[in-house]
Amino acid sequence: MPAAVQQLQTDLAEVKQMRANVATVEQALKADVTLLRETATLSKVASTPAAKKAVSQQLHQAEKMVKATQAMVVKSRGDADERARAALQEASEVQKAAEDLIAEAKKDVKTASAAK
């Protein structure tokens, strides 16, 4: 297999994996938001001082997790977009070079056939 084709296949796998990673991080964000909502609900029903303190700590931790995961989602999306754009540019350049090669080879085949 030509090196250019291997590189394009590697790029394709990387772009797909990055898209899958974005989806996974988005799923994690949904789970973290659900946990935050559940913890907020729990804080409303906590009745003892110890329970209120524990829930308050959990709520704070859940908020931090949501913020961190939101940042991961933004970063993952940006990285995936950047990689996809780079792959698109690279594939376009390879496609142009392949089209040029095809056109030149056709000329040579036509010339060789006419010379027979």
Image (tube, rainbow, N blue to C red):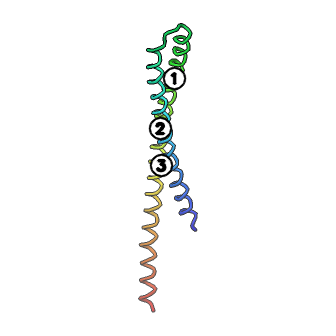
Q: Residue furthest top?
A: 49
Mark in front: 1 vs 3: 1
Q: Secondary structure at mark 3?
A: helix
**Residue 20's spot in the image, x, y percent?**
49, 46
| Depth check, front residue: 77 or 46 | 46
Q: Is residue 28 above or below residue 84?
A: above
Q: Is residue 78 above or below residue 62?
A: below
Query: Contact (CB < 8 A) between labels 1 and 2?
Result: no
For the residue carrying disc 3, how many other residues have a C-alpha within 10 Å: few (<14), some (14-19), or many (20+)?
some
Q: Is residue 111 above or below residue 100?
A: below
State the residue at coordinates (50%, 18%): 59
| Amino acid carrying mark 2 in the image | Gln
- Residue assigned mark 3: 86
Q: Quadrant of the C terminus?
A: bottom left
Give whichever of 63, 49 is nearer the camera.
49
Find the distance from the CA under tag 1 to the CA under tag 3: 36 Å
What percent of the width, then of the height, locates residue 54? 56, 14
- In the rendered image, the residue lying farthest to the bottom is 116
Depth check, front residue: 68 or 37: 37
- Upstream in sequence: badge 3 or badge 2: 2
Residue corresponding to mark 2: 27
**Number of marks present in the image shown:** 3
- Label 2 CA crowd tier, 10 Å (few <14, some 14–19, many 20+): some
User: What residue is pinned by disc 1?
Assistant: 62
Label disc, if present, on residue 4 of the rendered structure:
none
Q: Position of residue 87 (x, y in %)?
A: 48, 52
Q: Amino acid at mark 3?
A: Ala
Task: Name the residue: 52% across, 8% down.
Answer: 48
- In three-dimensional space, the C-alpha distance between marks 1 and 2, rounded to whole angstroms, equals 15 Å
> Is disc 1 placed on a helix, strand or loop?
helix
Which type of secondary structure does the marked residue at label 2 adopt? helix
Three-letter amino acid code at the position of disc 1: Ala
